Amino acid sequence: MNQLEQAKLEVIEYANRMLTDGLVKGTSGNVSVRVGDQVAITPGSVPYPEITPDRVAIVDLDGNHISGGNPSSETPLHTLVYRETDAEAVVHTHSIYATTLACTVDELPAVHYMIHAFGGDTVEVSDYERFGSDELAAAVHKALGDRRGVLLRNHGAVVHGPHLKRAYDLAVLLEWLAELYWRSSVFGEPRILSHDQLEEVATEAARRAYAGAEANAEGEG
């Protein structure tokens, strides 16, 4: 099985996981994987359980349709992320807590140290633009910057990663952080971690990852 066919299967698997895990409703949201200069992306307006490999849309990095079903309406957003970042997979959700925050705040602050996984002290909220538009793609790109996640004003969330499993895990993490912030706010003003505290977390996480790689190279568990 070639890489593109494998990517189609991954798109189907994680699209259905989004539905099962409650990160989307109906046919909302979308998932994509980059394979070289092509992108496998969920087709538009097709119920996730009905997506088959031949219905997964294939587009180029400019969003031009190559094969498969009609590409998701958010193809411009996905392809811009691929053109402007090192992303190999993109997940767009309408998860309830992330979307709630996107309707009410300008950023998700560092209520928990795990926010460091997104590459910054906050997760920003992009300006509102119509779904499926080039303007939305541009707004998301601006708010995303060099981070790996962004909230879309009155819309949802977008994350990217080096592969689809990591991107999906980040989507789940972003929803958890959004819920944690909301629940903390119920009891009072959440305590927010400082930049220095998050830098310490990032440094320690990198050290542990490096130590783990060395141990694996030496055959240690």
Image (cartoon, helix red, strand yellow):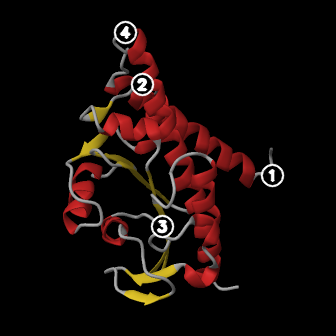
Residue under the point 42% across and 83% down: 59
Rounded to the nearest angstrom, the CA distance separating label 1 from label 2 is 41 Å
Rounded to the nearest angstrom, the CA distance separating label 2 from label 4 is 11 Å
- Kindly identify which residue carries mark 1: 219
- Kindly identify which residue carries mark 3: 88
Q: Determine whether 132 is above or below 57 in the image.
A: above
| Mark 4 residue element | loop
Residue under the point 60% across and 76% down: 8
Q: Amino acid at mark 3?
A: Glu
Residue under the point 74% across and 51% down: 216
Residue 197: name its quadrant.
Answer: top left
Disc assigned to residue 72: none
Q: Earlier in the sequence, mark 1 or mark 3?
A: 3
Regarding residue 116, the answer to whether it shows in the image is no
Q: Earlier in the sequence, mark 3 or mark 4?
A: 3
Q: Earlier in the sequence, mark 1 or mark 4?
A: 4
Residue 103: name its quadrant.
Answer: top left
Neighbour tally class for label 4: few under 14, some 14-19, many 20 plus, Cα within 10 Å: few
Q: Amino acid at mark 1?
A: Gly
The residue lying toward the viewer, choosing from 58 and 142, is: 58
Q: Is residue 66 left or right of residue 5?
A: left
Task: Indicate which label's residue lies in the foreground, 1 or 4.
Answer: 4
- Kindly identify which residue carries mark 4: 188
- Kindly identify which residue carries mark 2: 181
Residue under the point 58% across and 53% down: 19
